[in-house]
Image: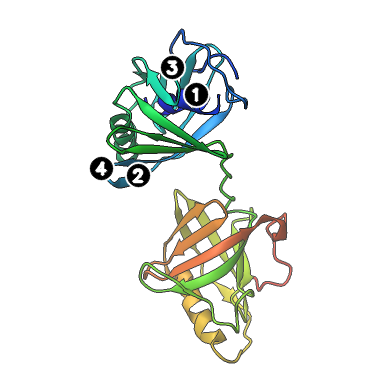
Amino acid sequence: MTALASAGLLLTACGTESGAGSEGGSGGRSVESEVPLTGIRWNVASVTVGGEKYDAPEDAHLKIGKDGRAGGSFGCNSAGADVKIKGDTLDFGETRLTKRACPEGRMKFEEHLTRALAEKKLTAKVDGDRLTLTTAKGDHVDLTSRAEEPDAPLTGTKWKVDAVGGGQSAAPLPKDVSGKVQLTFGEDGKVRGNLGCNDVTAKAEAKDGRLTFGTPATTRKMCPGDTMATERKLLKLFDGPARYEIERNTLKLTAADGTVINATGDPSGADPAGAGRNSPEK
């Protein structure tokens, strides 16, 4: 409902195309806009209700058609509605939603989004590729026309480790090893890399956000300063089942004992075959 609303508003705010919408609803009215808005995917970034901000789930978006219809997805259910625009306000008709059951987080977001756009009139403000839809109560929906970057793949990406630490946070790597620590998960079911001093290789199976490792094999160099202490922390990753999360080009690894490792992806720097040339093999 909110996504649709935003679509219509966007047309008004920018002001020469006729109509708004796609994916649902019927009818509509012509509007004038200096920049093309129809056929563009507007990604919902967040919704703020009662002072609380909620980030949108993946794929929450809307599209505006030239036929006076607006439609999209709230991250769970698809929606469609007619759009009427006057000045910088948007009025949308009855919103039709599909009735899929989704994980609780997505359903909650859909609830908040619907609540934010329950009022008939929304005020639109456009700033570059960003659109903000605001209700009379001050709740607002933030959208962007900027394309979402896909998450880097776990396999085949050279992950440069930036930080390691305990608990839920990680501290930047010491100067002695900064820029040296990296891991690459290969298509052959192994992870290879460097721990700042020694090379490492181990079997690695990834499934549903979890990693299962085999016993790691490392070279046996002795290094000065904080390097060996950092290496010991990094090796905790292989002590048991670990979790991984990827967002855009960042990777967070959480070891069984709670050790957290943060890394940044560099797809161009990975061995295409995912195979290290000099890593120790078991």
Q: Position of residue 162 (x, y in %)?
A: 55, 70
Q: Alpha-carbon distance for marks 1 and 2? A: 26 Å
CA gap between label 3 and label 4 equals 25 Å
Secondary element at tag 3: strand
Residue located at (58% from left, 25% from top): 37
* Amino acid type, residue under disc 1 in the picture: Thr
Q: Which mark is residue 233?
A: none
Q: Which residue is mark 1?
A: 12
Within 10 Å of disc 3 (Cα), the crowding (few <14, some 14-19, many 20+) is many
Q: How far apart, in angstroms, are the residues tagged by discs 1 and 3?
A: 10 Å
Image spot of residue 85 (x, y percent)? 44, 18
N-terminal-most mark, 1 or 2: 1
Q: Which mark is residue 54?
A: 2
Q: Quadrant of residue 50?
A: top left
Of circles 2 and 4, which is in front? Answer: 4
Give the numbered dot on residue 50.
Answer: 4
Few, some or many residues within 10 Å of mark 1 (<14, 14–19, 20+): many
Q: Which mark is drawn over residue 83? A: 3
Q: Amino acid at mark 4?
A: Gly
Tell me the quadrant of the picture where the C terminus can be found.
Answer: bottom right
SS class of the residue under badge 2?
Answer: strand
Tell me the amino acid under the disc marked 2.
Answer: Tyr
Q: Earlier in the sequence, mark 1 or mark 3?
A: 1
Quadrant position of the N terminus in the picture: top left
Q: Residue at x 29, y 47 (%)?
A: 52
